[in-house]
């Protein structure tokens, strides 16, 4: 009898786990360009928050659409898409903004030292804050 109960519980857990995994895999894509930002701030504020308390900053910023204003420190590419690194101050790190495919063409008009506004989804901090699916905001 106990074996049957354990077997049923394991089966329920497997089905539940499969359902959750399927829901996560089919999670709808967020269109950053058409979405309103959850937070609007300056690049230095975002960097300082992560550098001073990464755990608290993760709670506040992860998976949020963030609109950041800052100066371009570096322009580059990664996996065929444009990247913009923002840094306004004395911080060692920066904010790496991975542009969406549609935004790549706009990189031609950008210059280092120029102040811009970028909107993207925050995915975390690894010496730099990472924003993905970024679009340039006029």
Image (cartoon, rainbow, N blue to C red):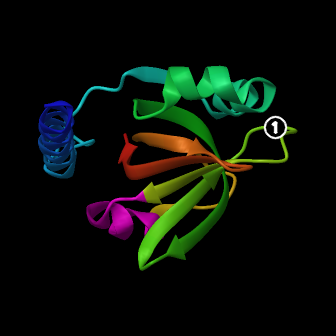
Residue at 75% x, 27% y is 48
| Left or right of 93, for residue 17 | left
| 51 or 43, nearer to the observer | 51
Using the rendered image of the protein, determine whether residue 74 is visible from the camera's viewpoint: yes
Q: Is residue 92 above or below residue 80?
A: above
Using the rendered image of the protein, determine whether residue 116 is visible from the camera's viewpoint: no
| Left or right of 32, for residue 51 | right
The image position of residue 108, as x and y in percent, is 45, 70
Residue at 62% x, 39% y is 70
The image position of residue 80, as x and y in percent, is 42, 79
Does residue 68 belong to the magenta stretch? no
Q: Is residue 69 above or below residue 126?
A: above
Neighbour class for label 1 at 10 Å: few (<14), some, many (≥20)? some
Q: Is residue 40 above or below residue 93?
A: above
Residue at 58% x, 71% y is 76
The image position of residue 90, as x and y in percent, is 87, 39
| 97 or 27, nearer to the observer | 27
Q: Determine which quarter of the picture holds residue 73.
A: bottom right
Find disc 1 in the rendering and name its residue: 89
| 57 or 80, nearer to the observer | 57
- Quadrant location of the N terminus in the rendered image: top left
Residues rendered magenta in the picture: 99-108
| Left or right of 126, for residue 83 | left
Does residue 100 belong to the magenta stretch? yes
Residue at 15% x, 37% y is 16
The overriding secondary structure of the stretch rendered in magenta is helix
């Amino acid at each position: 009898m106990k074996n049957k109960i354990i077997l049923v519980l394991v089966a329920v857990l497997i089905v539940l786990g499969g359902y959750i995994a399927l829901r996560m895999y089919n999670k709808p894509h967020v269109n950053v360009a058409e979405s309103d930002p959850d937070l609007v701030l300056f690049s230095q504020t975002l960097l300082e928050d992560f550098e001073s308390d990464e755990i608290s900053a993760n709670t506040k910023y992860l998976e949020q659409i963030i609109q950041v204003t800052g100066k371009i420190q570096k322009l580059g590419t990664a996996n065929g898409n444009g990247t913009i690194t923002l840094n306004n101050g004395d911080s060692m790190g920066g904010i790496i903004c991975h542009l969406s495919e549609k935004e790549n063409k706009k990189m031609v008009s950008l210059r280092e030292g120029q102040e811009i506004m970028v909107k993207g989804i925050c995915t975390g901090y690894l010496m730099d804050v990472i924003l993905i699916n970024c679009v340039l905001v006029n």
